[in-house]
Amino acid sequence: VQLQASGGGLVQAGGSLRLSCVVSGGAIRTYDMGWFRQAPGKEREFVADNSWDDKSTRYSNSVKGRFTISRDNAKNTVYLQMNSLKPEDTAVYYCAARPDTAYNYWGQGTQVTVSS
């Protein structure tokens, strides 16, 4: 299973970006999917996830109300819509797939930089 994240870039505070994560070698309809991020000098942290049946989503408190995770099973793609971006959202963003109890599959990451 391979995950390819894209859509990162440089944006001003208050702006928006949409990240995409295309999965190959596996069907995301059978996976919980998540987004994580890692800022320089910090540990990787949870951002959002979405259950395999698309009935449950969770967000970290720091992004709740600003970010939205969604999926398109037909395209085998998961998205992270990020609005009202803040400088503290600057990080490398990773998508991950959880087939059962652990996130076993990870993408390579995409850089998001928010300028003040």
Image: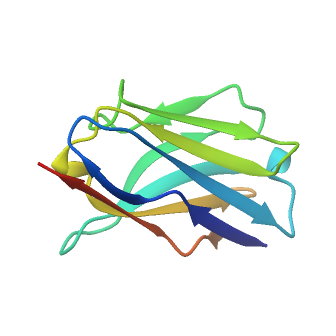
Q: Quadrant of residue 41?
A: bottom left
- Up the image or down, 13 lies above or below 38; here it is above
Instruction: In this rendered view, identify the residue nearer to me: 12 or 84.
Output: 12
Residue 103 visible to the viewer: no
If the image is split into quadrants, where does the N terminus sit? bottom right
Residue depicted at 26% across the width and 38% down the height: 62
Instruction: In this rendered view, identify the residue nearer to me: 31 or 109.
Output: 109
Horizontal placement of 90 versus 77: left or right?
left
Residue 48: x and y in percent read 48, 42
Residue 44: x and y in percent read 34, 66
Exactly how many numbered labels are in the figure? 0
Residue 115: x and y in percent read 17, 53
Residue, far left? 116
- Up the image or down, 110 lies above or below 75; here it is below
Instruction: In this rendered view, identify the residue nearer to me: 91 or 35.
Output: 91
Residue 38 visible to the viewer: yes
Horizontal placement of 35 versus 60: left or right?
right
Residue depicted at 24% across the width and 34% down the height: 14
Q: How is the image coloured?
A: rainbow
Residue 76: x and y in percent read 81, 51
Horizontal placement of 105 versus 84: left or right?
right
Residue depicted at 82% across the width and 67% down the height: 24
